[in-house]
Image (spheres, grey):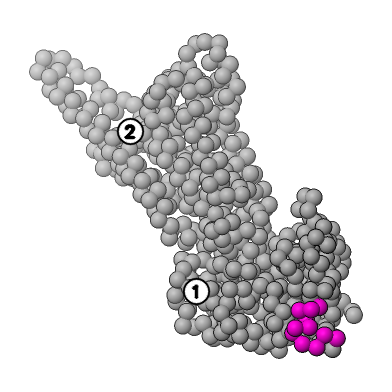
Amino acid sequence: MSEAKLAITTHNLSCRYGEFTALHPLNLDIPKGEIFGFLGHNGAGKTTTIRLLTTLLEPSSGEAIVAGCDARRNVVQLRRQIGYLPENVRLYDALSTRENLRFFASLSQIDDARERVEEVMDFLQIRDLADRRLGTFSKGMRQRVGLAQAIVHRPSILFLDEPTSGLDPMGVRMLREVIERLNADGMTIFMNTHLLSEVARSCSSIGVLSHGQLVFHDRIEAVSARYGDEAALEELYLSVVPGREDAA
Amino acid sequence: MKPSILIERHALAGLLRERTIALIAGLFALLVLASAYLGWSATITVDGIYASAVAWFEQNGQVAPPNPVTQGSPLALLRNLTIYISLVGAFSAIVIGHRMVEADRRAGVLPLIGTRPLDRLDYARGKIAALAEGIAGLIGLAAIVGVLTFLILPSIHVRANEWVRLATFFGLGWFYMMTFGLIAIGSSARAQSETAGLLMPAVLWLTLTFVVPALTGNILPTAAINPVSALAPAPQTAIFDWSAALLGPISLAEAYKYLGAELLGYLPAGLPPRGTVPPLVVLILTGAAAFAFALSSCLKLDMTKGGPDA
């Protein structure tokens, strides 16, 4: 596939912390407009991968091209193109939703920061939270505000790290709908998750990471054709992810 | 708006909201007022005694000597400020510097800032500029109190060159406090925990304010809290000659007090500075090193960490 059609491409991208290899050389191509589900056990290297792709970490070797920008050489340009929602997102508790969003929108250097903040609050139905300080918010409310800061600057790629973690079923459903609407508008979504059900429902392609290595990568249709339903997806996951003893 | 200016404004607004900072600024303001009151009280007392003495001399047909208040520099009235700036001022700067980065880390927003289209240099510039303005605010408060004190006292007449010296004194105080604030920024940016980030500059401040001056020869127990005993000559022994030569170049508090005394006009005649390096050079070199430390630490700041458990 030509690079112009790819949202994310990595060549031997790796990350080491001293002797420990968090991510073995990773080669991954994600076309534009995908909802990519990145599966893996705790400590598999999913968050490290997101941190590398969002320029929060420098790779030990290899390269990553995100939205056409090199993650080492065009860092600032790359950051204009991406939105990021970390697991357990936190914002300034002493500020209101609107103040938080205006700050992050301004940092993203968009011209219409104030108008855009209002637009995003409407889109995510959080206008009723606009003037409330975040210190009193529940996990679900924070997640929505966190998602708002991630999309306020109209990124072309959205990185979500375990976005449904700790959410109630209503929160999960709301998030899924938002992700689908954003994707329908052309946004590429890169989502780390534990939940096979979320992958089965929302994602157009999946990758499975185990102990820092990509052990599976395919389109969801191909997976469905071969494995049928969600239970079979679980079977696939368990078959490609070796136990800790096997990996050692 | 430039990202560095956004970071700067945001950091300043955050400082103004913090109770700890308000408490420290209040304490600093209180001590500045105390310093001004002590100077004012001493001047009024000496003036009163002098007026009685003049009456006594006149009754006995003798010529009264000149008023001691008008003999020395009127700026010496604020000499206690030198001590308060080196004690509470420097410590306030440490707390402000520490909060600069720590507030973002504690809030858990570093990963969100780290993925915005701004350079780490913009972040560092914004934080250092906010620190400079925060400290300027504290020093500005001290300057206003100082100037008002001179304007209120009837027997004090400050000449044009003395106003310049006073302004330079406050500039020196700002620079001294900035040095500690920059060290605190650098330390909190590098430290793995909030406690370690505050402890390192606090220990350094304690060492430079209380320990090093005693080792270079100022063995008076009140040296750290009294502007006059801070300028005692070192004992003439080989040990203190050596220790002053070795530690003089890093004895930041002594360098500041020496220059402060010179600017306010109460430096004892003929008192040499500690060590062989001129105090101004000591301050400038340390300030430059602190700036480099803060800048490099912010450029290497780990933006992946955040939240109260980080």
Query: Which residue is rendered at x = 54% and y = 82% of the image?
Result: A121
Q: Which mark is residue A138?
A: 1
Image coordinates of residue A109 in percent, x first then y, are: 63, 71
Pick whichever, B98 or A245, lies toward us.
A245
The amino acid pointed to by label 1 is: Ser
Looking at the image, residue A10 sits to the left or right of residue B287; the answer is: right
On the image, the x and y values in percent for residue A161 come to: 67, 71
Which amino acid does the dot numbered 2 rest on? Answer: Leu
The magenta stretch is A226-236
Residue farthest top in this picture: B237
Q: Is residue B38 left or right of residue B248?
A: left
Q: CA distance from mark 2 to mark 1?
A: 56 Å
Q: Which residue is mark 2?
A: B77
The x and y percentages for residue B86 are 45, 36
Chain letter, disc 2 residue: B
Q: Which chain is indicated by disc 1?
A: A
